[in-house]
Image (tube, grey):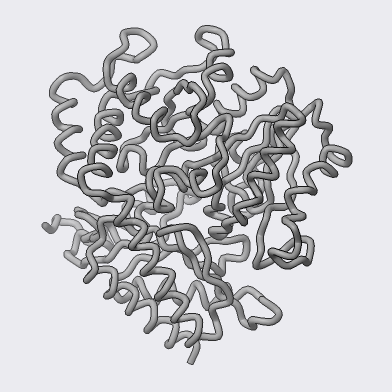
Amino acid sequence: MKTTHTNNSLHELRNSVIAKGNVSGTDRYIAHAKGALLTDVEGQEYIDFGGGIAVMNVGHSHPKVVQAIKDQADKFTHTCFMVTPYEGPVRLAQKLIAAVPGDSPKAVMFANSGAEAVENAVKIARYYTKKTGIIAFENGFHGRTLMGMTLTSKVKPYKFGLGPFAPEVYRMSFANCYRCPHNLEYPGCGVECAKRLEDFFINHVAAEQTAAIIFEPVQGEGGFVAPPKEYFLKLQEICRKNNVLLIADEVQTGIGRTGTMFAMEHYGVEADLTTVAKSLAAGMPLSAVVGKKEIMDSVHASGIGGTYNGNPLSCAAALAVFDIFEEENLLEKGRRLGETLRTTLLGFQKECDLIGDVRGLGPMVAMELVKDKKTKEPAAAETKALVKFCFDRGLIILACGAYGNIIRFLMPLVITDEQLQKGLGIVRDGLTAIRS
């Protein structure tokens, strides 16, 4: 399908009407998409290894999602759940409570974006604990609202010139085994990074003032850093002892991205509050906070909510997503995809000195490019060149990390073997080209 517009004409129009700060990674304009393929207005096809930044786990325009949205649109598109409720959010809350790890009774509130879910999780934690301090982590990303931006670690481009920021947020180092902030090596380190939380309560913010710790089970924008399994168990032990809540930001890791419905299943830890968004509704704007019922129910009537929270179209799409995962066995498919990715990238690493590390959980995998494997100097320019090389050959890949030297893989879980191998072949060719 082609439109009467060209990429160049649309880009010229875009530059005249869209704010310059709202950038796009390319100057190609998508006309339609299906599964793991995107097609621009001029008919050029791209294999999508980015998934709209972890939003399209069930694939673009999945027929079941499209039909669910159409069916709901025929009935109504909005009434406001706070005024006249409807069935969709209630049924979806049931699904989320069953899926989020942990046996505690739970309750749900819906919002529109990951950042909004994070804002509400912080509000709820502070309300329940009657404490104000929030601990976040270096290289974490939690959104672009005032609180989300404050919690986010990276300054440029997310925070630069956009302050002042929200008060009572404190930042500590995360468990990064490839670049250990304490110059230790796992497993001999005894996961010292988790034990540092006790010192943090002494030197930065007292436990008596700390409402919660917020973390990504696998850091997304920060470079797909996945801590050792013991890390969150130790954090949980310290937090329980000090009446500090655990907020798991599963906006990027949730809904099957790591081979389980939620990443915390890998760690055997039940968070007090979990934020969900991105792939929850297959591209429709929807997010949620899922938390222990005692905590969620502590907030007074109308203390949380919003006009569009639990939008009927978005909830219909999300319910279809849960059906797709079950009917198409997407978690198992994701696990197999993750094994293929890891095996292939480790093979690339043996052949290519640029790849310093391969890491992640399940199909949420990344490779870190370095100029030298001993010094681990980030290879940011080479990473940028690889992204361009791949795009020019019909493959969309995304860079991330504090230094922009990490390639992350977030392709839809429904990608075909042929598409996957073709895309990985382009990556291999790109690594060869930029290394020579």
Left or right placement of residue 253 versus residue 414 in this view: right
Question: For residue 320, which quarter of the picture?
Answer: top left
Residue shown at the point (33%, 22%) measured from the top left: 89
On-image quarter of the N terminus: bottom left
- Left or right? Give the position of 254 relative to 314: right
Residue 421 lies left or right of residue 72; in this view the side is right
- For residue 294, say whether it is visible: yes
Across and down, in percent, residue 308 comes to 37, 22
Q: Residue at x 69, y 64 (%)?
A: 187
The residue depicted at 55 percent of the width and 47 percent of the height is 267
Q: Nearer the viewer, residue 239 or 283?
A: 239
Rendered view: 421 above or below 65: below
Q: Nearer the viewer, residue 115 or 15?
A: 115
- 263 or 321: nearer the viewer: 263
Report whether 128 appears left or right of 334: right
* x then y, percent, for residue 126: 67, 22
Q: Give the vertical position of 419 relative to 149 (above or below).
A: below
Position in image of residue 344 (x %, y %): 40, 75
Residue 167 visible? The answer is no
